[in-house]
Image: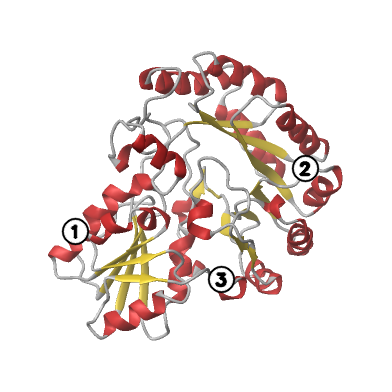
Amino acid sequence: MRIKLVYPAWKRLRQQTPFILPPLGLAVVAALTPAGHEVSLADENAGPIDLDDRPDLVGVGAMLTCQLSRAYEIADHYRSRGVPVAMGGVAATCVGGEARKHADAVVLGEAEGVWPSAVSDASQGRLQPVYRREGFASGREIPSPRRDLLAGGEYSYRGLRMVDLVETARGCRMGCFPCVVSGFSGKGFRPRDLGAVAVELAAIPNDRLYIVDNALEQDEIHERALFETLKASGKRWVGHCVSSSPELARLAAQAGCWYVYQAVVSLSDGFRRKVRAFHEVGIGVEATVLLGVDSHGPGIFRRMVDYLLEAGVEIAEFTVMTPFPGTAVFDEMKRSGRLIHEDWSRYNAEEAVFCPAKMTPEALEEGCQWAWREFYKEDPQRARMARLLRRVLPAQGLEE
């Protein structure tokens, strides 16, 4: 069969640095596809895609809630042309009953162990409505992705290939508010075999990686072993929630850590300590800021910007708290009547889709945009990003 995997377009935050990350999930699905089938991958975020073709099966992957509306449009289009469609991904799983109305089949949860069955059934003309794995895939079942399908120049920034995505474990014990990961991937930590990860790293020509694991600090044994693997690869990398103890921060730096993403909701001393610990070993920090939780009033925007500037983070990204379907906060907002609508295309972490506790939805949106402008007023985002790039590209001569 000719199988086309489609990653629908989604609206980026208007202030974000304009580079696109490749869709790792669909590249993993491609790797899970049994031999003998022709697989292509179309990422609508990287450019226009051909919707006039007639593959034998279309797989639409919706990772983000704000992709769902476009995913439904694409699925409906192909089905109207008589092409069977399977839909999956984190967001599609969270609204499985709704997604089922737009697809011949939905893959709920992780694709390992079920996507090959869906492909086999489709090849015989008996695609089933629902494919759901019982339990979660073990680390050894998670394959290396089909990176040959992600080789285009669309994933570059100012002429440079930015980062290739690597997954070394799944599951998250943290259960952070309001994340969907624990619901989709479970709270059990499932590391991949690091020998297989090492082979994957060696095959990636790019020297810059994004370790997409949800929180590296949740398992220190794996973290230490992973640092050894990354150090041996000689590559530079960014990741989520790296341990900030002096020893582990030093090991992360020695392993090539470039900068870390750290979520910020409150003005805590703990975050300041983490920033200091990373800076002491030469690791940068990007603060991913969540605004609009029930404890936030109108003064949070000024206080948050001042706090981040004082902490000295290299980059900050300001988002509106969004109650995504599949989370407890979504269910609570819906029960209490605080949801404004369920237009998934607007669940983009920039628009307020609920009624905040201590301000209006309009004040939350305006305050978030003010925070973007104010944080970068004296030191523009482009200049800050250029300095981060120089840490790993000293010979490129990037201009601010």
Q: Is residue 131 left or right of residue 201?
A: left
Instruction: State the image coordinates of residue 17 (x, y, percent, origin top left).
Output: 50, 36
Instruction: State the image coordinates of residue 135 (x, y, percent, origin top left).
Output: 50, 69
Instruction: State the image coordinates of residue 118 (x, y, percent, origin top left).
Output: 34, 77
The answer to whether one can see residue 25 in this image is: yes
Q: 190 or 23: which is nearer to us?
A: 190
* Mark drawn on residue 65: none
- Which amino acid is tagged 2? Ser
According to the picture, the residue beneath numbered tag 1 turns out to be: 76
Up-down relation of residue 2 to residue 222 (above or below) = below
According to the picture, the residue beneath numbered tag 2 turns out to be: 244
Q: Marks 1 and 2: in contact by CB < 8 Å?
A: no
Q: How is the image coloured?
A: secondary structure
Farthest front residue? 335
Residue for point 48% across, 44% down = 19
Give the foreground label among 3 and 2.
2
The answer to whether one can see residue 12 in this image is: no
Number of residues whose C-alpha sits closer than 10 Å to that of mark 2, classed few (under 14), some (14–19) or many (20 or more): some
Q: Secondary structure at mark 3?
A: loop
Q: Is residue 85 left or right of residue 317?
A: left
The picture quadrant where one finds residue 190 is: bottom right
